[in-house]
């Protein structure tokens, strides 16, 4: 049996990045062709995900040994394929890495990603949110002992990858983070966000903006 890992948080000192490749069309050999580009530059692929319609491929890669010139060359080579519509990429500058361009669905509907051990808390939404947040903060703390605004921005995307909300916009300026989150999964999302920020030990303020919230931390 294959255990397909849902990458919520990664770190361990690696310089990780993600590439989202949008396709014009699907055909045999596409995954192999794209993967070979990374291999040619000695870039290790950590995880690959493909959406249902096979129009988007998401790569998490280890760029620890890659130069900026190599990254630009990888991008250039990926975009040369006729089946590639566009490519966007980013490299995490934080001590941790959380994928931003992937969400989880079941039969096309948004899904919430939770470990099985949280099932006993399903009857108590507040406790459920607290326990999930504590688990995620523990992982973040193991990889990033100090939490600055850049690391906090990265960590906030755990909310989205968990399926509890969508991060619409984030800005880091003057050592402060401002973020807008929408499509909150009812009460559990708000409780989780409160618990996550509190457990991380940051000073924050949450402002209601219609169906969205703005976080200032």
Image (tube, rainbow, N blue to C red):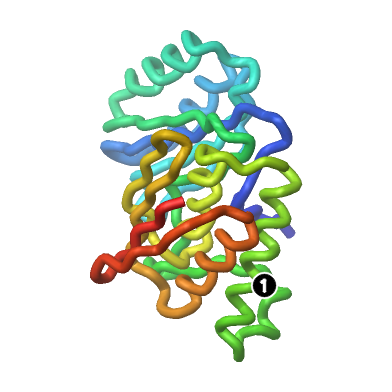
For image coordinates 37% across by 41% down, the residue present is: 171
* Foreground pick, 136 / 146: 146
Q: Position of residue 161 (x, y in %)?
A: 50, 57
* Foreground pick, 33 / 63: 63
Q: Position of residue 22 (x, y in %)?
A: 33, 38
> Residue placed farthest to the bottom in the image?
123
The quarter of the displayed image where residue 60 is located: top right
> Residue placed farthest to the top in the image?
69
The quarter of the displayed image where residue 13 is located: top right
**Mark 1, residues whose alpha carbon is within 10 Å: few (<14), some, or many (≥20)?**
some
- Figure check: 97 above or below 140: above
Q: What residue is pinned by disc 1?
A: 131
For image coordinates 74% across by 59% down, the residue present is: 1
Q: Judging from the image, what secondary structure is the residue with disc 1 in?
A: helix
For image coordinates 45% across by 79% down, the residue present is: 187
Q: Give the side of residue 147 with respect to residue 88, left or right.
A: right
> Residue placed farthest to the left in the image?
210
Q: Position of residue 21 (x, y in %)?
A: 38, 35
Q: Position of residue 74 (x, y in %)?
A: 45, 18
Q: Give the side of residue 140 with respect to residue 217, left or right.
A: right
For image coordinates 34% across by 58% down, the residue present is: 214
Count numbered badges in the picture.
1
């Amino acid at each position: 049996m294959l255990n397909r890992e849902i990458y919520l948080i990664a770190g361990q000192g690696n310089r990780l990045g993600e590439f989202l490749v949008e396709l014009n069309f699907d055909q045999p050999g596409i995954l192999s062709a794209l993967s070979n580009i990374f291999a040619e530059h000695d870039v290790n692929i950590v995880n690959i995900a493909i959406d249902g319609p096979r129009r988007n491929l998401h790569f998490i890669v280890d760029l620890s040994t890659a130069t900026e010139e190599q990254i630009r060359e990888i991008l250039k080579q990926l975009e040369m394929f006729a089946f590639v519509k566009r490519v966007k990429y980013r490299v995490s500058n934080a001590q941790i890495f959380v994928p931003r361009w992937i969400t989880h669905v079941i039969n096309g509907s948004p899904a919430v990603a939770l470990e099985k051990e949280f099932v006993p808390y399903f009857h108590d939404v507040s406790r459920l949110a607290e326990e999930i947040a504590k688990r995620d903060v523990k992982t973040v703390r193991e990889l990033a002992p100090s939490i600055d605004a850049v690391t906090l921005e990265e960590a906030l995307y755990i909310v989205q990858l968990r399926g509890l909300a969508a991060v619409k916009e984030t800005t880091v300026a003057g050592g402060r983070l401002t973020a807008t989150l929408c499509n909150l999964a009812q009460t559990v999302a708000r409780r989780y966000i409160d618990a996550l920020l509190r457990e991380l030990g940051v000073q924050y303020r949450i402002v209601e903006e219609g169906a969205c919230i703005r976080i200032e931390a």
